[in-house]
Image: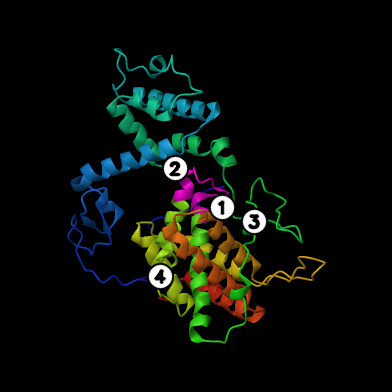
Amino acid sequence: MNRLKFDLKTRPPIVERPDKQLCGICRRQVSRYTCPTCNLPYCTLTCFRSEAHSDCSETFYRKEIETDIKTAAPKSAEGRNRMLEMLRSFEDENAEESDVLTDDGDDLARKLKDINLDEADPNVILSMLSPPQRESFLKIIRDPSNELAQQLLSSPELQQDRRRPWWESSMLEGDETPVDSDVFGVPPKMMSIPQALTAPKEASESNSHLMYNIVALCLAYAYVTRRLSWSPLSALKTTDSDHTVARDLLSQIAPFLTDRKSTLLFKSVDSVVTYVWSMLEAFSDTPSSESFCVLLSDATTLLRPQPVVVISQDDDADSPVSRWALLAISDIVALFTPGPSKLKHVLLKLNFYAAHLYIQNNNILTIVAEEIRTARLKMQSPPLA
């Protein structure tokens, strides 16, 4: 299963940016991004990769690839052998095209002769390439469509470590255990909601708008799950780098959750879509309409009311109709637990959202799910000429 890919594609203008600074490279278009190395404003990936900006762009990509190799490198002998095979294939191709490989010690096989592949760090293997070889190799890896890159990405080890979203799996009625857990993640454990928060409340405008905040949270949750190809997120170990990445991504896409002083309340699904899209743009991960529609479909699935299921025969307790959305929030709660004391307010907010979901009836959830579905259909429809 491939990770959800967000790339630079044309889309209808959703967010109007207040700043009108011109691109510092072409000087023709309004800048949309800022170089993380030199802070130069630029408009498109073409300008970022231009010859005039090559010093920064090449350094940036090299660091990104080296970081990816370090954090997501194969840990088994089979994975290391695949990387070695890629390097050897690269060596063969490079030898045919140039004279980079010389007779005075650049032979990769000879360099790796005494290396224990069961214990060697992939960075060590990579460091044995000469600078021109390493640059060419990283350029190949940088292109996911390249045949050599595909060999690494299709590694059985990497495929085995991926999990599709738990809400896409077939569930056994009465419990939350998927039949096909080797492919799909196991649904997270349902959180315990304080009874004091589930008492019926008088209807108010702020309470009704709170559902749209939950929609935004579901979109953020779906994005992080698909980007990391891991489900549930709470199954990530605290020592895993992706655990920190998951927290950080949720905080970036839904800052109203982690910002202690935030009083943001959305008033419609359209405002949620605009907001989440702009948050994705903020860290240079501009979505395509197609990929964003996947997230809207996920949010619809999570918020659509589920049939009531008896949890206990003894007390006749029933599961809430919003249990899938509650499972999503439960997963986020587990992800932020344990956490630093400065994030305690995040757990309080999540408990508040969960309690609000718990008391919603079938009609409210149906209306919200239908609004999300309508937003997805609008995004899928081609613009009128």
Q: Is residue 25 above or below residue 126?
A: below
Q: Give the residue type that dot 2 points to.
A: Ser
Whether label 3 touches label 2, CB < 8 Å: no
Neighbor class of circle 2 (other Cα within 10 Å; few <14, some 14-19, many 20+) is few
Q: Nearer the viewer, mark 3 or mark 4?
A: 3
Whether label 2 touches label 1, CB < 8 Å: no
Q: Circle 4 sits on which residue?
A: 275
Q: Circle 1 sits on which residue?
A: 234
Instruction: Determine the secondary structure under disc 2.
Output: loop
For residue 287, say whether it is visible: no
Q: Nearer the viewer, mark 3 or mark 2?
A: 3
Give the percent coordinates (x, y) of residue 323. 65, 67
What segment is highlighted magenta in the picture? 225-244
Q: Circle 2 sits on which residue?
A: 145
Asked if the stretch drawn in magenta spans residue 243, the answer is yes
Instruction: Determine the secondary structure under disc 3.
Output: loop
Whether label 3 touches label 4, CB < 8 Å: no
Q: Is residue 163 above or below residue 99?
A: below
Write down the quadrant of residue 105 in the picture.
Answer: top left
Q: CA distance from mark 2 to mark 1?
A: 32 Å
Q: Earlier in the sequence, mark 1 or mark 3?
A: 3
Q: CA distance from mark 4 to mark 1?
A: 25 Å
Q: CA distance from mark 3 to mark 2?
A: 33 Å
Q: Give the residue type that dot 1 points to.
A: Ser
Give the percent coordinates (x, y) of residue 335. 52, 55
Write down the quadrant of residue 51 in the picture.
Answer: top left
Q: Which label was assigned to residue 187?
A: 3
Give the percent coordinates (x, y) of residue 357. 59, 73
Neighbor class of circle 1 (other Cα within 10 Å; few <14, some 14-19, many 20+) is many
Out of 351 and 286, give the one closest to the viewer. 351
Residue lying at 46% horizontally and 55% vertically, measured from the top left? 247
Asked if the stretch drawn in magenta spans residue 177, the answer is no
